[in-house]
Image (cartoon, rainbow, N blue to C red):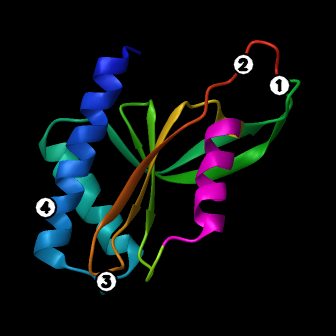
Amino acid sequence: MKWDHINQLCDVVRETSFAIHKYHRNGHLEKVYENALGHRLRKLELGVEQQHPLTVYDEDGTILGEYFADLLIEGCLIVELKACKSVADEHIAQLLGYLKSSRIETGLLVNFGAAKLHIKKYLMTVSESGS
């Protein structure tokens, strides 16, 4: 995956999220925002999977289970959505855990629940040494 592509993809998600927040404002359930973002990104002809199961691996490659990403975009970007008053440390930890265990490098945490849209990109680079 080229970095210019992943950054462009993040920009599209940011712009689309902003447009959704501008139109719908805060106050809806998380599922409404998930459906809206999935719908609008598909209209842009992006590959979007909602509640996509991702395998969680241990450090030695053993499969531990799975979790469901709110959105998996183009197979390379996890988007974790929230609809709460403010982003908490546990929301960030959740996304970072998803990135590490699924071995996907880039994720966006988007909170539609406040008057001001919150969106932040997180990176999890898996090192060669396994540390």
In the picture of the structure, the residue carrying the numbered disc 3 is 28
Residue located beneath label 4 in the image: 19
Note whether 121 is above or below 61 in the view shown: below
Which amino acid does the dot numbered 4 rest on?
Ala
Callout 1: 10 Å neighbours few (<14), some, many (20+)? few
**Quadrant where the C terminus is found in the figure:** top right
Q: Which residue is mark 1?
A: 131
Q: First in sequence, mark 3 or 4: give its number.
A: 4
Amino acid beneath label 3: His
Question: In the displayed structure, would residue 117 be above or below residue 77?
Answer: below
Mark 2 and mark 4 in contact? Answer it, CB < 8 Å: no
State the separation of the CA atoms marked 3 and 1.
40 Å
User: Residue under circle 2?
Assistant: 127
Which class describes the residues within 10 Å of circle 3: few (<14), some (14-19), or many (20+)?
A: few
Region in magenta: 87-100
Q: Relative to 130, is 30 on the left or the right?
A: left
Magenta span has 79? no
